[in-house]
Amino acid sequence: MGEPRIGLIVNPAAGRDIRRLTGGANVVDNYAKRRVAECVLQGLRAVSDPPEATLMPDEVGIATTVVEDAPDGVSASLLDLSVRGTAADTRRTASRFREEGVNAIVVLGGDGTSRDVALECGDTALLPVSTGTNNVVPAAVDGTVAGAAAALVATGAVEGEAVTRRHGMVEARTDSDEVVTGLASVELSNRSFVGTRALLDPADLAGGIVSRANPADIGLSSVAGALGPLAPDESGAIGLRLDDADAAARTVRAIVAPGVVAEIGIEERRRLTGGEPMTIEVEEGVIGADGERELELVDETVEFRSVGEGPRLVSLEAVFARAARNGVLADG
């Protein structure tokens, strides 16, 4: 086994879509992301012998600056990867980290970035940090805290199996065998074009599926959670058919986007287990995943289902509680 190593992925495009103009989402610029990434590397010094850090390169130079300014005692380098400024960069980086045996991956982005990593990282421990628009999965946590947790896991100071939880994933599959996979949710919109990619108008939502449900979440997970919770590591999923609030027998108030609370009509809410599907027919529409439009549809039947175990997400509370019990943060 090689030296302990963490991977760091910073998505320059996260947190900069149209919802910054039409909703109440915060603007997370590249300077702020660089500062968070720098704090991640500082957090690695929570252990006496910090793990090495390898960063995904990017077109705007965030990772280059972070590597150049790495703190004393922390070895940092760029992954040898040619980037194109697309989500494929994130997926290829996560795949490389998995193949090279990186011990933990810290991701700076939103749900979309976390999903891209989850699709390729395998069993590598994952710490998503919120710097995006939809932030159901990533934690709103200081980068130093995330870096310290990653160091504790990567070096074996705490046992990874004891401080990680499997997060479920969900998918939509069309009659034409197109597949869209989501980490927190896959949504079906009645809008017939991808456009800006951001899902904006709650009146457009026809339904979908979530791997987690909590009214404190954002988007479809908040809608499902208004009628009862589903923990991220519980098996199965929740399928939803939605309707106009004026026509539905049941409605909920939910946080459907940053800065947007809406009344949503519920036609059906069903717990799906054991791979059980739920289908919705659509004349024209768009399938989105984790708040971003992905696939345009015409005259399709969409089948939604849980796809079982997803990534191993690190529980920050569990990491630091175990580290304190083990005395790994104290000398003498």
Image (spheres, helix red, strand yellow):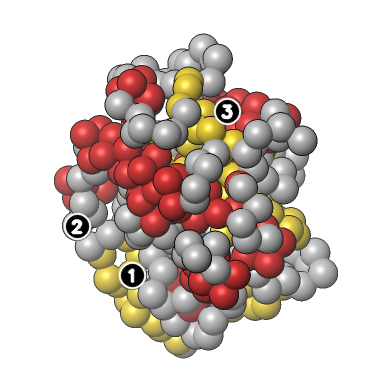
Point out residue 272 in the picture as x, y percentages from the top left corner: 72, 72
Q: CA distance from mark 3 to mark 2?
A: 31 Å
Check disc 1 and report the residue beneath it: 255
Closer to the camera in the image, 325 or 198: 325
Mark 2 residue type: Gly
Horizontal relation, residue 129 to residue 280: left or right: left
Q: Residue at x 55, y 68 (%)?
A: 327
- Of mark 1 and mark 3, the one earlier in the sequence is 3
Closer to the camera in the image, 185 or 132: 132
Q: CA distance from mark 1 to mark 2?
A: 11 Å
Check disc 2 and report the residue beneath it: 24
Where 181 falls versus 307 (above or below)? above
Check disc 3 and report the residue beneath it: 93
Horizontal relation, residue 64 to residue 7: left or right: left
Q: How many C-alpha atoms fall within 10 Å of the one at disc 3: few (<14), some, or many (≥20)?
A: many
Q: Residue at x 41, y 69 (%)?
A: 217
Horizontal relation, residue 35 to residue 208: left or right: left
Q: Nearer the viewer, mark 1 or mark 3?
A: 3
Q: How many C-alpha atoms fall within 10 Å of the one at disc 1: few (<14), some, or many (≥20)?
A: many
Q: Nearer the viewer, mark 3 or mark 2?
A: 3
Residue 1 tag number: none
Q: How many C-alpha atoms fall within 10 Å of the one at disc 2: few (<14), some, or many (≥20)?
A: few
Where 253 falls versus 46 (above or below)? below
Where 152 falls versus 4 (above or below)? below
Horizontal relation, residue 105 to residue 254: left or right: right
Mark 3 residue type: Thr
Where 96 falls versus 132 (above or below)? above
Do labels 3 and 2 touch, CB within 8 Å? no
Mark 1 residue type: Ile
- Of mark 1 and mark 2, the one earlier in the sequence is 2
Label 1 residue SS: strand
